[in-house]
Image: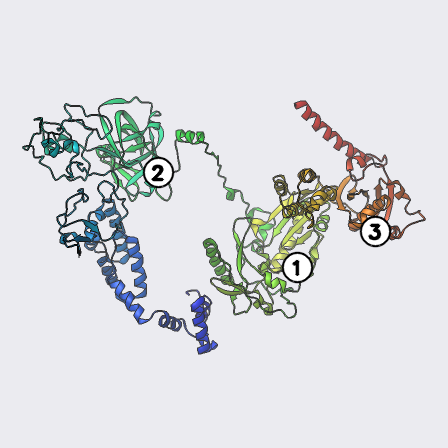
Amino acid sequence: MSKCAIDQQVTYISGLFLDGALSWWNLQVQTLGEAAAYALSWTELKELMRKKYCSRAEIQKLETEFWHLKMEGSKIAEYVQRFHDLSHVVPYMVTPEFKRVERFIWGLAPQIISMVTSSKPATITEAIDLSVALTEEAIRLNKFDEIEPKKKETHVESSSGNKRKFSSFKQSTGTVVKKGESNAPAQDSVGDRKKSRGYMGAQPKCNSCQKHHSGRCSLRVCESCGKTGHTKDFCWANAGRGGQGGNGNRNNRSGAGNRPQGNQGGNGNRANQAGTVNRNQGNHQAGNNGGNGQRPGCFNCGDQGHFKRNCPELNQARGRVFNMEAREARQDPNVVTGTFPVNQRYASVLFDTGADYSFVSLEFKNMLGLAASKLDIPYSIELANGKLVEANEVIRGCVIELGEREFALDLLPVQLGSFDVVVGMDWLASNKAEIVCREKIIRIPTDDGETIVVHGEKRETPLRIISCLKARKSLKKGCVAFLAHIVDKKAAEPKIEDIPVVREYPEVFPEDLPGLPPQRQVEFRVDLVPGAAPVAKAPYRLAPSEMQELSTQLQELLDKGFIRPSFSPWGAPVLFVKKKDGSFRMCIDYRELNKLTIKNRYPLPRIDDLFDQLQGSSFYSKIDLRSGYHQLRIQEESIPKTAFRTRYGHYEFLVMPFGLTNAPAVFMDLMNRVCKPYLDKFVIVFIDDILIYSKTKAEHEQHLRAILELLKKEQLYAKFSKCEFWLRDVQFLGHVVNESGIHVDPTKIEAIKNWEAPKTPTEIRQFLGLAGYYRRFIEDFSKIAQPLTLLTQKDKKFDWGIKQDEAFQLLKDKLCNAPILALPEGTDDFMVYCDASRQGLGCVLMQRQKVIAYASRQLKVHEKNYTTHDLELGAVVFALKIWRHYLYGTKCTIFTDHKSLQHIFNQKELNMRQRRWVELLNDYDCEIKYHPGKANVVADALSRKERIKPIRVRAMEMIIQTDLSSRIRAAQK
């Protein structure tokens, strides 16, 4: 409400009410009266809403919830969010700021509350940031898992079968479970233990110990006695019964077979699992020695000669390495990743404080160029998923480059995941490296007192580099490779100050429209058919991205004054249309309004008429108006009819919006009035597209300055990025125009070339619609398209056959190889070539051996009964009618292959149809001449008449070119 006028605040906010809130507001309007209701202040409206939706009973519930609000486990984000929500509703409970901080700290988890309290944060932001950081650290150290059992309640079943509920394990007579001990098969003195509620944490449940933890289970449960800390092979009970002694065969946990006897000093490959607590520390060796008299060995390793408490393997930690994915590593705050040279080969490196040693992947090992040496004793490596692998060799003398320094590195080859090298604690400790996990950096002190800072990949901007080996593997697997080249297009964009003449008028090219347009000689109005009633439709559902765009564009339109809040009974929904530059244009679905609107019959110019004005031109400039429709006001009485409804309110336009049926005609009327002094002299206009054309450069400078001065005077603004100046070839209305003539737009040719064969009548209509737009470039267009046109009829079954496919391919070929059509020069030397057949009529207009246009049409039903004489005469009449604007009032020559037509003016007996057509021919100064062959085939037709030598030369050129290309193809076979 910050940008809303005070007297409009209630109006704006009430427009957002929906469902029950809208019904409540309508009741308030009826009760208070419309004037009094909308005269309420924002404070008074809030008080009314608070009484309705926030009663004292509801507030008390929220106060109670706030008073008892506590952080559940490690869910700090949920706690912070709920704290903010309740603080907003009952702010008096946390005012002033120090009370807010105290209340927040009071509800924190016990693992972090003391540390936050001792830090004495001054603001709630400091308290939240510190709590989040400490929670993440506590999660990493598994502090929340340690007290998890204390939160569980236990049901203990008495001997009578009655159940008693205890609040914690401290009150239970069952066994207290500590970290690392089994809570599963131990005998409970009271009875079977049952859980009162399920585990609420994120760790998976282990099938061995029935506890929730990640990684390999650290519990040893004897299958013979059910106790923990040893296995059946070394069970004291078995030894007492003459079972297998402590030196029996025992499987090596690393999968290396039976354990060899002898000295196990040095870096042995056995280690007690971290976290396992063994209650039988003493082994009780003084007990029964077994039936064979053999003394049982160590409960940990199985060897004789020492007890478990003295076992040398207890002091040897098993190597561990995290085999995580690169994406997980970037998200994990406890590790640092990056791409660094290792032996002058770029490698994906993971710096991991959880790995005891440094490792290299088996794939990258072969790229180091160093030989591996055997280890005296293999290492047993525990991966993050609990799997054990062996490393029996090491690559010594590797070099890793960090911060322009080289460091020695010994690597153990193992199978890794997404990384080439994992740098563990052996290297980090020896180099006194300090890892700042949150900032993803490593600090390495040097002997000369300097500190090398190595920056790893961050979550926001990860380095997307892979090794050549990985790229080769991906290609072998069938992955698609792309070579992308980045081009800075903005650097090549022209600037206003670099363009002659244009730089004198920067005010015509603003970055945005300055506001409401001035009053013009034309204003838009909506005239309704008699008896039309207002129509209002519900808003369309929009995607979240579209909702954001809607909110942004509404605010922009409000700021410019183009729209205002509406109370109109009219209402249309909003939708978005994607523009060429990728942005979205907000359009209103005015279809219902358009049905009730009287159509404006102001004519839009014919495109071929516009191109005819360009004859003899060589220099062009194209100007595109910025949001042209928004530069025209709407008449005051028509404004309510443009109302539209959105999620954010009800608005109406003060300027002409997109989507109204009469908008193009009205804007065309405006542009014709504005440009009338220069229209068809050196400028043509089609709605909001302006094309300036000139014969010479000097003329173009004068013409361009005149149009820019006119736009400045009329306060019409253009979009500089879509304008083009001083062109020799211009793309205009789907065509390319230059001094040679008119070409088909290359982008349209590409679309036609890739057009697939139609599968429905609708797809045929779409193709014929695009092809028909360029029919003036295609001779016999209607004849060629006839098999396709027949399939669009309602009573015809869609049967795509050979004829249809041939016609489709022929049209595509002719469009892709369309000729250049010349622009007419003056009114002399026009020639028309006509031909008729049972399929249709065709004709060609030429001037001075250059093709101006092609025209054709299919025969109507009754015309199929005409005689050949009438069909040929009908083709002549068709040509005169369609090109009347070229041929009327000037002398022209008509060529036909029907010999009797040259005597049509002297023929005595004529039927009614022929008489009517002859009267039309008498209006033209034309001469009909005969030549043999098909007149609609230009190459053949032009070679028939000796008197028109330039035409024959042109025809010969075309034939020779075609023959030459075919001979070249034949020679290449």
Pick whichever, 950 or 465, lies toward us. Answer: 465
Residue position for label 1: 665
Task: First in sequence, mark 1 or 3: give its number.
Answer: 1
Q: How many other residues sit within 10 Å of disc 3, few (<14), some (14-19) or many (≥20)?
A: few
Q: CA distance from mark 3 to mark 2?
A: 81 Å
Q: Residue at x 81, y 39 (%)?
A: 935
Q: What's the residue type where badge 3 is placed?
A: Gly
Q: Is residue 447 visible?
A: no
**Above/below status of 478 relative to 503:** above
User: In the image, which is nearer the foreground, mark 1 or mark 2?
Assistant: 2
Q: Is residue 858 left or right of residue 367?
A: right
Pick whichever, 167 or 254, lies toward us. Answer: 167
Q: Is residue 505 visible?
A: yes
Q: Residue at x 64, y 52 (%)?
A: 690
Task: First in sequence, mark 1 or 2: give its number.
Answer: 2
Q: What percent of the width, then of the height, locates residue 224?
A: 16, 36
Q: Is residue 807 left or right of residue 572?
A: right
Q: What percent of the width, then of the height, locates residue 200?
A: 26, 51
Residue position for label 2: 326
**Above/below status of 820 relative to 710:** above
Q: What's the residue type where badge 2 is placed?
A: Ala
**Which mark is drawn over residue 889?**
3
Q: Quadrant location of the N terminus?
A: bottom left
Q: Is residue 321 left or right of residue 293?
A: right
